């Protein structure tokens, strides 16, 4: 929800690479917080001692989703929803500055409204 307006403001003020640098800095901060500050949430007795490597891959996850038809349908619907949302964002950010001379900040602000509507 906040990513598009922040990206639009950064792009209009600092250039097209600035949102990527900002995102990388947030990811580094997040990694440091996870490794140093946030404790393990499970008690030691409930932790699984080993990871089953045959299920720790994308195909294992897809097999697990395919076991239940309801979960499969929800997963497909969710995939289609987000594919449409990403398509809207890409088209919006490329078309409206060209066709209507909108700034990237204005495009980002309008897309954040669409993001809030999708979240609801």
Image: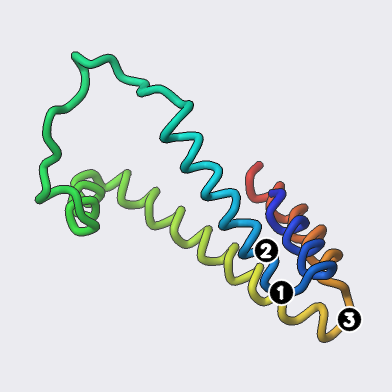
Left or right: where 63 falls relative to 100: left
Q: Are the residues flagged by discs 1 and 3 in contact, CB closer than 8 Å?
A: no
Q: Position of residue 72 (x, y in %)?
A: 31, 51
Q: Residues within 10 Å of mark 3 (few under 14, many from 20)?
A: few
Mark 1, residue position = 16
Please give the residue where the numbered disc 2 appears in the rendered image: 19
Question: Do labels 1 and 2 touch, CB within 8 Å?
Answer: yes
Residue sitting at 47 percent across and 62 percent down? 80
Q: Which badge, 1 or 3, comes first in the chain's sequence?
A: 1
Q: Is residue 119 above or below residue 25?
A: above
CA gap between label 1 and label 3 equals 19 Å
Name the foreground residue: 16 vs 90: 16
Say which residue appears at 53% left-offset and 50% top-offset.
27
Residue carrying label 3: 100
Disc 1 is placed on an element classified as loop
Q: Residue extending furthest bottom?
A: 98
Residue 5, image quadrant: bottom right
56 left or right, relative to 104: left
Number of marks in the image?
3
Q: Is residue 115 left or right of residue 59?
A: right
Name the image quarter holding the C terminus.
top right
The residue closer to the viewer here, 71 or 115, is 115
**Measured along the vertical axis of the image, is residue 44 above or below residue 107?**
above
**Residue 48 picture location, percent across and down:** 17, 27
Where is residue 110? Give x, y as percent. Answer: 81, 60
Q: CA distance from mark 1 to mark 2?
A: 7 Å
How many residues crowd around disc 2 within 10 Å: few (fewer than 14), some, or many (20 or more)? some
């Amino acid at each position: 929800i906040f990513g598009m307006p922040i990206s639009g403001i950064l792009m209009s003020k600092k250039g097209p690479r600035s949102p990527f640098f900002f995102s990388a800095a947030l990811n580094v901060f997040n990694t440091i917080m996870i490794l140093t500050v946030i404790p393990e949430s499970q008690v030691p007795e409930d932790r699984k001692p080993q990871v089953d490597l045959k299920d720790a891959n994308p195909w294992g996850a897809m097999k697990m989703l395919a076991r239940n038809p309801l979960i499969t349908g929800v997963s497909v619907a969710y995939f289609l929803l987000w594919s449409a949302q990403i398509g809207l964002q890409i088209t919006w950010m490329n078309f409206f500055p060209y066709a209507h001379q909108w700034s990237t900040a204005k495009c980002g602000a309008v897309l954040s409204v669409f993001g809030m509507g999708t979240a609801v």
